[in-house]
Image (cartoon, helix red, strand yellow):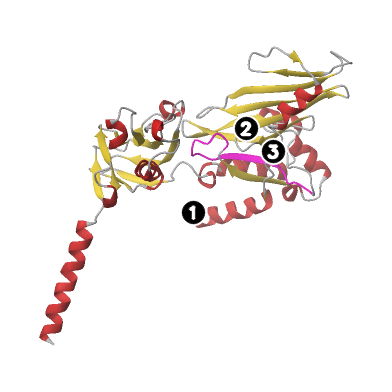
Amino acid sequence: MKKFFIFLIICIFSIEGYAFANADKIYKNKLFSIAIPENLKGSYEIKKDKDKISIYHKASKKAGFGGFTFGIKAYKNPADHAVLPGSRKLGELVDKKGNLYDIVLKHPTDVQYDYTKGVNAPDSFKLLYDLGEKTDIKGVKGSIYYKNQGMKGEDLYKEILKKHIKAIDEKWDSNKLEKEKMSYMYNVIAQTDKNPKEKIGYVYYDVNVDGIEELLIGEIAQGDWKGVIYDIYTMQDRKPRHVVSGGERDRYYICDDSFICNEYSSGALESGVSVYNLVENSTQLFPQVNFKYDAYENSKNPYFISYSDEKWENVSADAYNERKRVFEKYERFDFIPLSKASSNLHKIMLNRR
């Protein structure tokens, strides 16, 4: 029995020693820490600031190719990171003084490894790059990190959904809906459909790929029909904001994953599609390309394309259709009926009481 306990103690210390030897390496600044797995030891360099930690691939940096793989930074002002390409919010941090920060992941937007040796990054570079999505972040010195906070639609747009439910239940007229920056289509549907909250639904979707979900409210698709979006909401400076409303001849969709497409019609001889990006931390729609069929302007060749300068170019039908086809992959969302949102919000209110 004595020999057994000695053997057990030796095993425990051996296991603990192995775990310690293979523990993640922790790097911290004045706000947070990140963890780098032990198996990556020797492949990277760290640069730290009071609110940022950057990780570089050592071999690529030494060879003069930058070597930046990812960085984690804390921002007090969301507008400061919204304009940065390759950035995505991961969560929020509250420091010991109560200051709120966005914790943001930054990846390189250009090649940072020795591309002369091949088009693919070295495995050790890829491992570091991928670590940015899953590194363990913790608050330090009294700070607390909340992963995914300020990002999920179900936490951000409760009051907006309640407002839409109220508008339908009370059958707000078009004037009131317009005043409240809501689509007049809710009045049309409420007047003509017995169960409007079964026909109108919502979904959360990160349109501008910044890590923060938008709220899309629209008509639930029937059959092969693509569901139209009547209202889009986004977060600006951590507050929900209205982006745009649509209607019968002014319909909005999400196309090609992250573009907003606006189909409009001005009559039998004029119609078109405008394609936009939603600017991060903003309600601004930035124009990408516009397509217009306008037989009023040119009955023999009614095909026009314009870009952000809004100068229309008359093109052939083949050129028009080829360019337009790029944006014809529309996202067909499984909208959640507002009737279910009403039930879920009621449960939340009861739990709060």
Residue 176 drawn at (x, y percent): 71, 31
Identify the residue under disc 2: 259
The type of residue carrying mark 2 is: Phe
Q: Residues within 10 Å of mark 3 (few under 14, many from 20)?
A: few
How far apart marks 2 and 1 lie (CA) works out to 38 Å
Secondary element at tag 2: strand
Q: At which x and y percent is residue 98?
A: 31, 38
Q: Which one is earlier in the sequence, the residue at label 3 or at label 2? A: 2
Which amino acid lies under the numbered mark 3 shown in the image of this protein?
A: Lys
Q: Position of residue 313 (x, y in %)?
A: 74, 14
Query: Which of the marked residues, 3 or 1, is nearer the chain's N terminus?
Result: 3
Real-space CA distance between mark 3 and mark 1, rounded to the nearest whole angstrom: 42 Å
Residue at 36 percent across and 31 percent down: it is: 76
Q: Residue at x 59, y 54 (%)?
A: 344
State which quadrant residue 177 falls in. top right
- Residue furthest toward the front? 117
Is 146 situated left or right of 32 in this image?
right
Q: Which residues are magenta?
A: 207-222
* Residue 352, disc: 1
The residue indicated by pointer 3 is 329
Q: Nearer the viewer, residue 228 or 189?
A: 228
